[in-house]
């Protein structure tokens, strides 16, 4: 009896063939598809506790690569790691070993995030100045142990100084919690005030800086001033007895003045009131007084010059012109002493009025002005003297 092999259904067989074809195509695509390249970088750390080959390399906490090797080199550890070059890192990036917890593996964190500029190339090395490591638990415990030893019975509290300090502090603070709170609150308010007035504060500091700069630039003058002050201090020190005596006499004088003022209070009040009235009068006539004080020296000088010592009279110079020519006298009055007056009117008078005026008679004999003037320009004749001295009745 012949046995026949069971045949697979045609539908199942076609599905199996299709699956095998798809798997083959995917494997071929994976083999042919180009893989992304890696950027290999190294960094030096002072220590690398908990860091091993295969540990993560992260940017912003996201894994982008792994540690390739951890090699001790003298006083530091050289760590080589690589990351996908699709993630760019600044050429001046820093590296830090981060410990997520006390017992977990650590990883290398690259920072800051790339925002532009040169990127770190493969083969770059991050020096110790740009790396950081976490503080180890054993170092913290060792530091605490050293602190306890320093404060313990073999250290600062060897003679009980720390205990006495704590007891004294507790005694001083006992019942003063409210005051301590107020002090802290006031200090906070003061700091807030200083913060609100920081512009004024900085302005004050700037002015002080300018003042000190001015003193520095005038160092010689400042030294001279200090030297002069020292000299004055020495002189005052040498004259201390005289100063003491002068102050003593001044005290006596002040007592006498006080007694005098007390005894003559009414009279002093009256004198002060009169002085106030005089002062008010002077203040009201300030302009007239100023003009008088300005012109008085000139008037006194003119009075001295007008005095004639030979005759004992006050003489003046007669500068009147045109006594024998009325029109000339009138024109001199119209044009003024500077000849800037109405000269046109004077010309008109000469043309129209002069022919109509009669001639004045000549001066009497002996009164000729040409022969009456002396060497000093004064009229020395008496009896017909038109000067102020003649009017005052001066003798010959």
Image (cartoon, grey):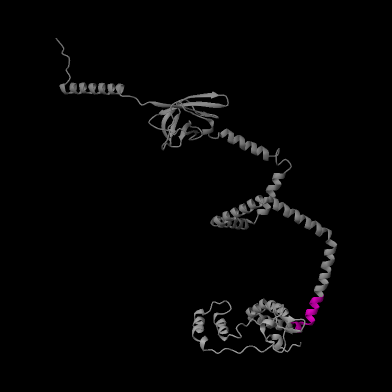
Where's the N terminus, which quadrant? top left
Q: Is residue 340 above or below residue 128?
A: below
Looking at the image, residue 259 sits to the left or right of residue 330; the answer is right
Q: Is residue 336 above or below residue 240?
A: below
Whether residue 186 is situated above or below residue 142 in the rendered picture: below
Rendering coords of residue 208 (x, y %): 62, 54
Residue range of the region highlighted in magenta in the rendering = 256-268
The answer to whether one can see residue 316 in this image is: no
Locate residue 369 relative to residue 24 in the image: left or right.
Answer: right
In the displayed orientation, state which residue is furthest to the left. 1
40 or 27, which is in the foreground? 40
- Residue 122, given in percent of the width and then of the height, sits at 43, 26
Q: Main secondary structure of the magenta part?
A: helix
* Whole-percent x, y for residue 250 in the image: 81, 70
Place of residue 61 in the rendered image (x, y in percent of width and height, measured from the top left): 43, 36
Residue 28 shown in magenta: no
Quarter location, residue 85: top left
- Between residues 394 and 368, which one lies in front from this camera angle? 368
Of the pair 122 and 42, the residue shown nearer to us: 122
Q: Is residue 116 left or right of residue 330?
A: left
The image shows a total of numbered marks equal to: 0
Report whether residue 246 is seen.
yes
Quarter of image, res 388: bottom right
Magenta span includes 259: yes
Nearer to the camera, 391 or 95 = 391
Left/right of residue 48 with respect to residue 230 in the rendered view: left
- The quarter of the rendered structure image containing the C terminus is bottom right
């Amino acid at each position: 009896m012949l046995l026949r092999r069971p045949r697979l259904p045609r539908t199942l067989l076609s599905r199996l063939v299709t699956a095998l074809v798809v798997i083959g195509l995917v494997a071929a695509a994976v083999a042919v598809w180009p893989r992304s390249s890696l950027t290999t970088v190294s960094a030096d750390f002072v220590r690398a506790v908990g860091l091993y080959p295969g540990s993560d390399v992260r940017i912003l906490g996201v894994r982008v690569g792994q540690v390739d090797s951890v090699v001790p080199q003298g006083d530091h550890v050289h760590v080589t790691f690589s990351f996908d070059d699709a993630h760019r890192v600044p050429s001046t990036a820093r590296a830090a070993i981060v410990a997520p917890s006390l017992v977990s593996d650590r990883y290398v964190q690259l920072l800051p995030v790339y925002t532009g500029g040169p990127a770190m190339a493969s083969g770059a090395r991050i020096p110790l100045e740009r790396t950081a490591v976490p503080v180890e638990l054993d170092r913290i415990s060792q530091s605490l142990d050293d602190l306890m030893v320093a404060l313990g019975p073999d250290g600062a509290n060897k003679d009980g100084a720390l205990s006495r300090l704590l007891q004294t502090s507790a005694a001083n603070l006992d019942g003063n919690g409210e005051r301590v709170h107020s002090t802290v609150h006031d200090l906070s308010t003061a700091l807030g005030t200083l913060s609100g007035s920081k512009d004024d504060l900085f302005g004050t500091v700037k002015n002080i800086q300018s003042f000190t700069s001015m003193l520095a630039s005038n160092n010689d003058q400042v030294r001279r001033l200090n030297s002069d002050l020292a000299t004055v201090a020495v002189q005052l020190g040498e004259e201390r007895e005289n100063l003491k005596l002068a102050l003593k006499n001044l005290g006596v004088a002040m007592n006498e003045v006080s007694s005098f003022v007390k005894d003559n209070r009414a009279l002093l009040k009256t004198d002060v009131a009169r002085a106030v009235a005089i002062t008010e009068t002077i203040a009201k006539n300030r302009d007239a007084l100023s003009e008088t004080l300005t012109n008085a020296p000139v008037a006194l000088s003119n009075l001295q010059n007008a005095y004639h010592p030979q005759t004992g009279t006050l003489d003046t110079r007669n500068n009147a012109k045109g006594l024998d020519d009325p029109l000339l006298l009138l024109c001199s009055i119209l044009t003024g002493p500077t000849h800037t007056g109405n000269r046109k009117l004077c010309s008109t008078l000469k043309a129209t009025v002069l022919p109509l005026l009669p001639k004045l008679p000549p001066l009497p004999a002996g009164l000729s002005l040409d022969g009456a003037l002396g060497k000093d320009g004064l009229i020395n004749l008496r009896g017909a003297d038109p000067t102020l001295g003649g009017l005052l009745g001066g003798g010959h």
